[in-house]
């Protein structure tokens, strides 16, 4: 019987959460929910030198905003707590000692200066220094120093690390759920540091111990961790534990050029690489976020899901529930996925069109109040309905609809050519027609005006364009008669008269 699905997202609180990390969290979430499992978040904060205040809270808030909050994490359903590695450090020494006793690890006392000297010697000879089977029997460690001397040094407070003793002469044939079978030659691996004399484990030891104790069934992470796979599998073997299944996700690539997507790419091309805005507590530098740029969380989830994964169909728009239903790791690509900021805007446009007009109107009303405009919510909702198809972000609503709330103070210079010598008389006649309309609904206004034009053999272009220019200030905007009905008879006639005066 297979064990229950338990997957984790394990970020380090060293700064804002990169969009690539968000995708890793999303794929873990989708896999867990698809398989009726648990998605948990563990904070890997053992490297206190890189710890950034506020980063952990930022990570949690990002996942909450996106709707993929973990089932278990710090302060929430701590079934296998604590969920911060810094609060679990008392555990790791026991497991490091266990590896020492079983012969899978050893103490190393080599100074940083000595190792740097050895690296320089190898570089001078065209080689790369690797601390492993090729030289460990000749270096300053418990493989070359007797047990009494080792104990003496440790009790005297000597600096040391505990290194993994990588087996020699073995080809590891491992399986990756995305990449298939992969092979590693243990002779080419280095003896990684697992534990330091300051009492803190390295990532490799803490990661394996925690994944085991928290009963992780699958490890779904970025492909940058693929080189660590042999060490991690060997650690499971050394402890006598069953290893989880591994899946390494493809990189998210730059929109232009080669390589992994970075913050610099976003800065250069003007798009965010973080889910939320981030203000660096040290430098004070502010980095933009998708939320503050006006992206809807549903759109961000959708475009991230399609970076490196496909459903096998032509469908592009997926709700989170739909993604859960169709997600399959076998459909994750091995190759990197190119980030497309323009396509991401397209996704947001699609979701913006789906958004509830009343909800958008409520937020838009706050913006209007800041401009000193107080209109009934029903009016604002109707305005949103009329203009939203041209909008990708809520921030564009004002530019698309300002004429509903304020008369134009200037007229588009190119469009002004539509006000010809005969236009003044036609516009004056039109005001009389409008004045006599009792049912001032869009449909009735349109029928009345068009009948008047037909009866008087007036061409559409002679009325419609100067009329729109009078009301809007340009030739943009939704259906002209909807605008007239919305702003009302008095305001419509006032704006026409103002335009007549302007173009005299």
Image (cartoon, grey):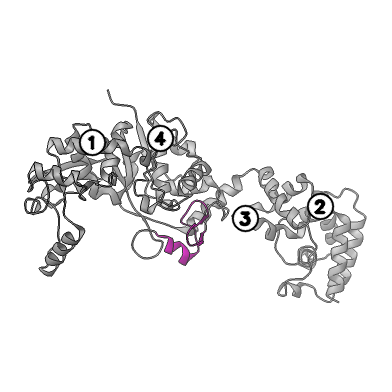
Disc 4 is placed on an element classified as strand
Q: Residue at x 31, y 37 (%)?
A: 90
Q: Quadrant of residue 235?
A: top left
The answer to whether residue 346 is left or right of residue 313 is right
Disc 1 or 4, which lies upstream in sequence?
4
Residue 83, placed above or below residue 169: above
Q: Which residues are magenta?
A: 262-287
Res 391 label: 3
Query: In the orientation shown, which residue stands out farthest toward the top?
Result: 1
Residue 313, given in percent of the width and then of the height, sits at: 41, 43
Q: Nearer the viewer, mark 4 or mark 2?
A: 4
Q: CA distance from mark 4 to mark 2?
A: 52 Å
Q: Is residue 342 magenta?
A: no
- Which disc, if any, is residue 39? 4
Q: Is residue 41 visible?
A: yes
Of helix, strand and loop, which one carries label 1?
Answer: helix
Please identify the quadrant where the C terminus is shown: bottom right
Q: Are marks 1 and 3 in contact (CB under 8 Å)?
A: no
- The answer to whether marks 2 and 1 mark residues whose Cβ atoms lie closer than 8 Å is no
Look at discs 1 and 3 and give the one toward the viewer. Answer: 1
Q: CA distance from mark 3 to mark 2?
A: 22 Å
Measure how far apart labels 2 and 1 are at the Cα level: 76 Å
Instruction: Identify whether 462 is placed above or below 446.
Output: below
Residue for badge 1 = 95
Residue drawn at (68%, 61%) of the image = 399
Label 3 or label 2, whichever lies nearer to me, is: 3
Please name whichever residue, 364 or 64, is drawn nearer the observer in this view of the structure. Answer: 64
- Circle on res. 485: 2
User: Residue 125's spot in the image, x, y percent?
Assistant: 10, 68
């Amino acid at each position: 019987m297979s064990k229950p699905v338990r997957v984790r997202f394990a970020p380090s609180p060293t700064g804002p959460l990169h969009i690539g990390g968000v995708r890793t969290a999303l794929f873990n979430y989708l896999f867990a929910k698809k398989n009726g499992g648990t998605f948990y978040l563990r904070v890997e904060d053992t490297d206190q030198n890189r710890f950034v205040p506020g980063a952990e809270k930022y990570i949690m808030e990002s996942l909450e905003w996106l709707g993929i909050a973990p089932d278990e994490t710090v302060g929430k359903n701590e079934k296998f707590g604590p969920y911060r590695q810094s609060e679990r450090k008392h555990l790791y020494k026991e497991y490091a000692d266990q590896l020492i006793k079983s012969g899978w690890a050893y103490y190393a006392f080599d100074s940083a200066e000595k190792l740097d000297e050895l690296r320089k010697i190898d570089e001078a000879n065209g080689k790369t220094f690797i601390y492993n089977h090729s030289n460990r029997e000749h270096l300053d460690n418990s493989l070359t120093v007797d047990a009494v001397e080792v104990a003496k040094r440790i009790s005297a407070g000597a600096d040391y690390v505990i290194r993994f003793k990588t087996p020699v002469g073995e080809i590891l044939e491992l399986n990756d759920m995305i990449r298939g079978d992969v092979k590693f030659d243990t002779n080419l691996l280095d003896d990684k540091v697992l534990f330091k004399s300051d009492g803190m484990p390295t990532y490799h030891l803490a990661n394996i111990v925690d994944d085991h104790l928290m009963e992780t069934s699958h490890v779904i992470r970025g492909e940058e961790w693929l080189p660590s796979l042999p060490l991690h599998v060997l650690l499971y073997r050394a402890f006598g534990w069953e290893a989880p299944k591994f899946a390494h996700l493809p990189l998210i690539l730059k929109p232009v050029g080669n390589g992994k997507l970075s913050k610099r790419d976003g800065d250069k091309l003007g798009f965010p690489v973080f889910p939320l805005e981030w203000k660096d507590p040290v430098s004070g530098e502010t980095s933009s976020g998708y939320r503050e740029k006006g992206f809807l969380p549903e759109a961000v989830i959708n475009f991230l899901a399609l970076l490196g994964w496909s459903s096998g169909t032509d469908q592009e728009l997926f709700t989170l529930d739909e993604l859960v239903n169709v997600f399959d790791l076998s459909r994750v690509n091995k190759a990197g996925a190119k980030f497309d900021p323009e396509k991401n805007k397209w996704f947001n446009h699609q979701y913006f069109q789906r958004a509830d007009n009343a909800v958008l109107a409520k937020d838009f009303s706050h913006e209007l109040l800041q401009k000193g405009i107080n209109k009934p919510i029903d009016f604002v909702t109707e305005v949103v309905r009329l203009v939203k198809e041209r909008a990708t972000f809520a921030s564009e609503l004002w530019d698309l609809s300002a004429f509903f709330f304020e008369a134009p103070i200037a007229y588009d210079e190119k469009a002004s050519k539509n006000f010809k010598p005969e236009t003044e008389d036609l516009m004056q006649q039109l005001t009389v027609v409008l004045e006599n309309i009792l049912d001032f609904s869009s449909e009735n206004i349109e029928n009345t005006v068009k009948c008047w034009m037909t009866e008087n053999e007036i061409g559409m272009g002679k009325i419609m364009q100067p009329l729109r220019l009078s009301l809007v200030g340009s030739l943009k905007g939704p259906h002209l008669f909807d605008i007239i009905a919305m702003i009302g008879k008095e305001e419509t006639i006032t704006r026409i008269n103002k335009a007549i005066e302007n173009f005299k």
